[in-house]
Amino acid sequence: MAKDVEDLSEEARVAEIRGRIKTLTPRETEVFALVVTGMLNKQIASALGVGEKTVKVHRARSWRRCAPDRWPSWFGSRTAWA
């Protein structure tokens, strides 16, 4: 029973994460996906062929849209990216 409640809680958390990610623009999503892998702004800029300032802008916008108070717990949720 406790496992079922835990599974439902995890499913709800993943659904919330996916819903927030869907609000991002395609470029914000690309940047967000690279940020959570641990890449630096400079590395992301090089990988995407854009300036570092552009990455910083997209990173900041995605941060605001995805509720930064919840990010630390989201990083452990790999299923949200699947």
Image (cartoon, rainbow, N blue to C red):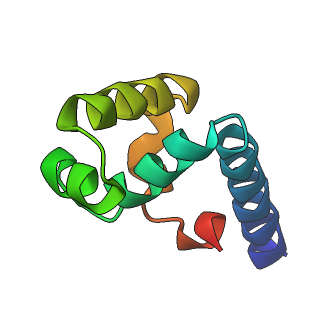
Q: Is residue 27 left or right of residue 41?
A: right
Quadrant that contains the N terminus: bottom right
**Residue found 73% across the figure and 43% down from its top:** 22
Residue at 33 percent across and 53 percent down: it is 35
Q: Residue 42: x percent and y percent?
A: 14, 49
Q: Is residue 56 above or below residue 4?
A: above
Question: Does residue 57 lie above or below 10 as drawn?
Answer: above
Residue extending farthest to the front is 49
Report which quarter residue 21 is drawn in: top right
Residue at 71% of width from left, 51% of height from top? Answer: 18
Q: Specify whether 58 is left or right of 37.
A: right
Residue 71 image offset from top left, x and y in percent: 44, 43
Residue 28 horizontal/vertical position (percent): 51, 40
Query: Residue 52 lies in what quarter of the image?
Result: top left
Depth check, front residue: 22 or 11: 22
Q: Is residue 74 left or right of residue 44?
A: right
Task: Work out whether 79 lies above or below 25.
Answer: below
Which residue is pictured at 53% across the width and 71% down the height? 78
Give how far across and how far down residue 70 sits, in percent: 49, 38
Given residues 19 and 10, the one toward you in this image is: 19
